Image: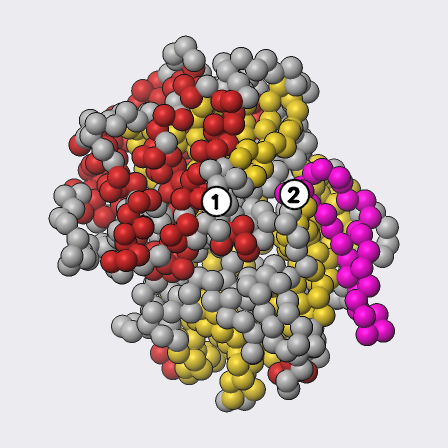
Amino acid sequence: MIRLHVIGACLLGGLLMGTALIAHAEEPNDPHLWLEDVGGEKALAWVKEQNAASTGPITAAEGFDQLRTRLLDILNSNARIPPIAKAGPYFYNFWRDAKNRKGLWRRTTLDEYRKADPAWETVLDLDQLADAEKENWVWKGASFLEPDCQRVLLSLSRGGADAVVVREFDVRTKEFVADGFVLPESKSRVAWRGPDSLFVATNFGPGSLTDSGYPRTVRQWTRGTPLTAAVEVYAGQQQDVSVGASRDLTPGFERDFIYRGVTFWTNELYLRRGEQLIKIAKPDDAKASIHRQWLLLELRSDWQPAAEKFLAGSLLAVDLNRFVEGERKLDVLFEPTDRRSLDNVIPTRNHLILNVLDNVRDRVEVLTYVEGKWKREPLPGMPEFSSVNLSAVDEHESDDYFVTIADYLTPTTLKYGSVGKGPAEALKSNPTFFDAKNLVIHQREATSQDGTRIPYFEVSRHDLKLDGSHPTLLYGYGGFEIPMVPGYQAQTGAAWLERGGVYVVANIRGGGEFGPRWHQAALKANRHRAYEDFAAVAEDLVRRKVTSPRRLGAMGGSNGGLLMGNMLTLYPQHFGAIVCQVPLLDMRRYNRLLAGASWMAEYGDPDDPQQWDYIRTFSPYHNLQANAKYPPILVTTSTRDDRVHPGHARKFVARLRELGHPVSYYENIEGGHGGAADNPQTAFMWAVAYSFLWKELTSLPP
């Protein structure tokens, strides 16, 4: 399926690493602006000083080394499920463990994969490559040329940043192609158009990037010619988010598409016929995807293209060619309710599999187009309460699918099935990484300030005494239409639940738990609803005597880091400790830093005085007060994070220290937006976070 919409949140990439010191003419002087100089000598000296002062006491504490080792053993375990993806006759996997710190790209057959100990054929050893080329390569993915899947575009990152080097690789010879396609480090959008042609959206020099740092132009590049000779096929506007192009290589449905991302939530889609661009007359805020003859539209707002009105959150289908010719009779494949929303659409050759969230629980349906109508039936063998994640094995050739099933306490199981052939076959299961025999999962609800019911998941001991004494970790995100659904979290289990802690995940507004309306309820001027929701869950945990403010911790990253910053500044009385990871915090300058301009549809434009009036109310950097009583906070980031600028975290910590408040800081020099580039770094990062929380929440009486 060709997906033609932007997916993500603060998970989108931004500009290359560099200095971002452009000040707003009208803003007050920022004494910490120098900390935005990502690789500056003075700024990095400050980072090293803060790291030593903060992590030293944490890592020296009793039990830290044991926890870090435990978490690293989980990450490196050879008993983990190796996730696979089909390309040609093989199933490929990227694997890291204790022997392969950077990782192996390898492959096997399905019959071999079914064995307890499959035989793997190494295609590329990233540790060997990094050593030979003296580069700190981090794997970022592979794009195969279909249908033979012998040539592939590999994306490799230096140190984990989003910016990648793209290089053509031959899986038969297991070598990079001599004089093959190569793109220098950039936030490129690259797609195969054929064996000797690519669509390339990249940094072509001055004027070729948008204000968000994404490509503004897309070009067609022919093998054997220099990149500078690539022919421009489309150019967006400077204020757009990004542009891109793709070719549908499905046999019998070969077509070119151009995508223009106007804002994070609005876009335009064009069908390219020769030199002609035909704009698809869809709503600008609808997600579009193409599967064979079908145009699939996921609506973010109500739409009435003709006599019939379609509700926001609906999934519609129509024959693409007929739609281009003016057909406006669309089939409704899904319509939301107050507590039901569409989570995902998975096409196979002859079917569409819908993953639906029903009160944040997965339900799976299969749709089949038969004799002019869509027939609907449940996918057999799906669990009642676990989270389900599906993917097509090869949507062009078969109706086979992979499905993973898990919840907070049940290790993930990978199954392989085929639509219409009964329940899926279990292929692999993760081991039990922590003791869950006395633990239970409850789904509960809190009532937010405006009366809205906010669901949350609570994992605790089955005999939990409601006396307010339990160390409790409350996690949240609340942005970009991303739902927080249950999943097996081995590190949380080992580091928190086994020690007697309670773990809670809040399904606050701004996320995608109940579709577009749930997300849109917390946009821009209404952002505080997400924070009110999270605070309401915190209050409910205290009201029910699960915990007390002194025993309640909070954690979140990226947009969830902004959430944590606002918990500190707006609701400090609710928490005993906070962990704030790779965060946005300076909402006055966020749109000038890396990919920040792409998120203005979510938060607003701080350069507009009227919008800054409300943005300021949820800009933690600007709302810190000297006379406030804040709980201890750990702020973490990565020097190589080229999505959310590390300056957010640095300046926030500097301001807290300036005002005399307790704050700990850890900045990993590598890692990108994920905070870590390999398993040892990941284990260290999480050991620091959980050790900090446990100490702060248990060192004093509740």
Give the farthest residue toward the bottom.
275
Q: Nearer the viewer, residue 106 or 232?
A: 232
- Where is mark 2, residue-wise? 359
- The CA distance from mark 2 to mark 1 is 16 Å
Residue at 54 percent across and 54 percent down: it is 517
- Where residue 194 appears, as percent x and y from the top left, is 57, 77
The relative height of residue 281 versus residue 576 in the rendered view (above or below) is below
User: Which of the numbered marks, if any, corresponds to residue 501?
Assistant: none
**Disc 2 element:** loop
Which residue type does callout 2 highlight?
Asn
Q: Position of residue 333 (x, y in %)?
A: 71, 63
Q: Quadrant of residue 682?
A: top left
Relative placement, left or right, of 177 versus 109 is left
Q: Report the amino acid beneath label 1.
A: Gly
Magenta residues (range): 360-387
Is 642 or 84 nearer to us in this picture? 642
Q: Is residue 371 above or below residue 22?
A: below
Let me know if residue 372 is in the magenta part.
Answer: yes
Circle 1 packing at 10 Å, graded few (<14), some (14-19), many (20+), is many
Image quarter of the C terminus: top left
Residue located at (58% from left, 53% from top): 515
How many residues crowd around disc 2 within 10 Å: few (fewer than 14), some, or many (20 or more)? some
Q: Is residue 112 left or right of residue 67?
A: right
Residue 370 at what x, y percent from top left? 84, 70
* Image vertical order of residue 414 relative to residue 219, above or below: above
Q: Position of residue 67 (x, y in %)?
A: 48, 22
Name the quadrant of the N terminus.
bottom right
| First reached walking from the N terminus: tag 2 or tag 1 | 2
